[in-house]
Amino acid sequence: MPLYTYRCQECSAVFEALVRPNRPEPEACQICGKAAITRQMSAFAVTHSEVDALRSLDPTYKRMVEDQMARTPDGEPMRILNKLTPFDAADDPGDPIDF
Ligand SMILES: [Zn+2]
């Protein structure tokens, strides 16, 4: 279901509407009720192109991150987690602090 963005020529309101298949698109502004709305480029299409742009960067970026992680073992989350004391082995912390 496409999500369309509409702009009102009368009051400049911008609103979004989910347009279901075989249902009419909105014909009037949701704010002022005037029928002077135009459909804008959908946010869906913009997001999609951004995803494509990120995907095209991905192989290089992923390798950079992995190289950096290999050089900084302290950055590995499991290394930190393994140093923590599990709940069943922890000392009783005492009474909760009353703020
Ligand atoms: Zn309006």
Image (cartoon, grey):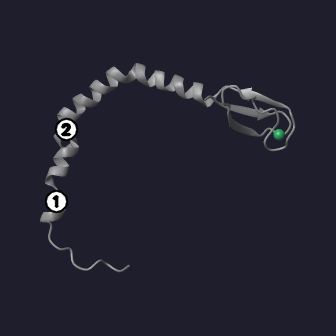
Q: Residue at x 69, y 36 (%)?
A: 17
Residue 70: x, y in percent?
A: 18, 33
Mark 1, residue position: 86
Amino acid type at image mark 2? Thr
Residue 34 badge: none
- N-terminal-most mark, 1 or 2: 2
Quick one: 87 or 12, which is closer to the camera?
Answer: 87
Please identify the quadrant where the C terminus is shown.
bottom left
Q: Residue at x 73, y 38 (%)?
A: 14
Q: Residue furthest left?
A: 89
Q: Is residue 50 left or right of residue 90?
A: right
Q: How many discs appear?
A: 2
Evaluate if marks 1 and 2 touch, with contact meaning CB atoms under 8 Å apart.
Answer: no
Q: Residue at x 64, y 28 (%)?
A: 42
Please identify the quadrant where the N terminus is shown.
top right
Amino acid type at image mark 1? Pro
Q: Is residue 89 left or right of residue 22?
A: left
Q: Specify whether tag 1 is near ligand 1 (CB below 8 Å).
A: no
Quarter of the image where one finds residue 29: top right
Quick one: 94 or 57, which is closer to the camera?
Answer: 94
Q: Specify whether tag 2 is near ligand 1 (CB below 8 Å).
A: no
Residue 54: x, y in percent?
A: 43, 25
Mark 2, residue position: 72
Give SS at disc 1.
Answer: loop
Residue 90: x, y in percent?
A: 15, 66
Give SS at disc 2.
Answer: loop
Say above or below: 28 vs 52. below
Q: Residue at x 47, y 26 (%)?
A: 51
Say above or below: 95 vs 75. below
| Crowd rating for badge 2 (residues with CA inside 10 Å; few <14, some 14–19, many 20+) | few
Say above or below: 7 vs 52. below
Q: Is residue 93 left or right of residue 57?
A: left
